[in-house]
Image: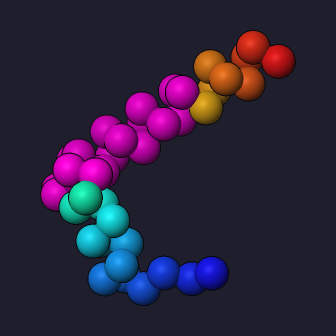
Amino acid sequence: MWLTRREILEQLGRLGIRTLRELKRACRDFESYWYSQHQRM
């Protein structure tokens, strides 16, 4: 399933992400979470 740019922006808005800075931070947070989950295995 592919999302349009508009749908992606709407989803990000629902998550409270409105600026590029917030998006970058959310990505870094997710990468940290993902890395920590794989270290447990």
Residue 27 is one of the magenta-drawn residues: yes
Residue at left 20%, top 50%?
16
Residue 40 appearing in the image? yes
Q: Is residue 12 above or below residue 39?
A: below
Residue at left 52%, top 27%?
32
Looking at the figure, which quarter contains the N terminus?
A: bottom right
Q: How is the image coloured?
A: rainbow
Q: Is residue 16 above or below residue 11?
A: above
Looking at the figure, which quarter contains the C terminus?
A: top right
Residue 18 locus on image (x, y percent): 17, 57
- The chief SS type of the magenta part is helix
- The residue most toward the right is 41
Residue 26 is one of the magenta-drawn residues: yes
Q: Is residue 19 above or below residue 29?
A: below
- The residue most toward the top is 40
Residue 36 locus on image (x, y percent): 62, 19
Left or right position of 24 against 19: right
Magenta stretch, residue numbers: 15-33
Q: Is residue 9 above or below residue 37?
A: below
Residue 8 locus on image (x, y percent): 37, 72
Residue 10 locus on image (x, y percent): 27, 71
